[in-house]
Amino acid sequence: MDMKPVLRLKNIVKRFGEFVALHGIDLDIEDGEFLTIVGPSGSGKTTLIRLLVGMDNPTEGEIWLRDKRIDTVPANARPTCMVFQSLALFPHRSVGENIEFPLKIRGVSKTKRKQRALELLELLRLPEHYYSKRINQCSGGERQRVALARALAFDPEILFFDEPLSALDYRLRKTLEKELKDLHERTGKTFVYITHSLEEAMVMSDRIAIMRSGRLEQVTDAEGIYARPVSRFVAEFMGEVN
Ligand code: ADP
């Protein structure tokens, strides 16, 4: 299949003073793929994803969204959305208000917002009456689903995830891994996901980009990880699982 990159990173360098956090990253992210960026703590994953969503600017290099250069475009003007570990929901507000929030700040009418929120509840397999349920009455898994619905509210082209499952217990994590993979298939959107867990990456992704010390060491699929474990991170992981 002839894949066109939706996002293209060209020689991305990020310095914090003297410290080089990213040493020239080149990466094409394909339209509709589930790409996971995996690597040990401190390898530069968060730094990279912050540049991709526009929370910070690269020191050098270019980021292209299709045929538009976006590394100078502010976060709120990009067709992307980020789901954080903390979820950042309003606990005393209803599920509906939380999902509608990104639409409200974009000036979408109340009727349209509600219609979209109800569609998203259905997509995330939450019952319709959850629309008026308060967040602090929802379980951990339900909150994750609400955060996903909110991220999808304005129909972003690309969804970014910053370790959204890492604070959860094992069973809930496993359930949500499946749900995320399923959501990816049902929406057809491009998902870019960061995690320090190679296991999580291998369960969900089409491709895995392995980072180490601010460099991309390997970009492959799950089978490639087993077939050609060049990365020390992978070798360590394989040592753990074997
Ligand atoms: P990861 O997400 O893979 O754990 P980070 O991207 O958070 O890694 O960090 C990569 C490196 O960049 C770390 O050594 C971190 O200390 C450094 N770093 C990140 N943000 C800053 C900053 N704002 N100022 C200085 N150093 C930073």
Image: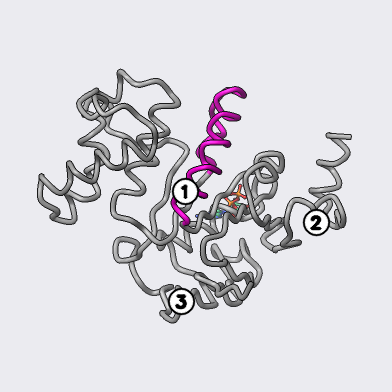
Label 3 secondary element: loop
Mark 2 to mark 3 CA distance (whole Å): 27 Å
The x, y position of residue 215, in whole percent, is: 70, 63
Q: Residue 66 shows which numbered tag?
A: 3
Q: Amino acid at mark 1?
A: Arg
Residue at 57%, 66% in the rendered image: 29
Earlier along the polypeptide chain: callout 2 or callout 3?
3
Residue 169 among magenta residues:
yes
Identify the magenta region: 163-188
Number of labels in the image equals 3
Q: Which residue is mark 1?
A: 186
Q: CA distance from mark 1 to mark 2?
A: 25 Å
* Type of amino acid under label 3: Arg
Mark seen at residue 76: none
Image quadrant where residue 97 sits: top left
In the image: residue 108, left or right of residue 204: left
Q: Residue at x 71, y 39 (%)?
A: 199
Within 10 angstroms of label 3, few (less than 14), some, or many (20 or more) residues? few
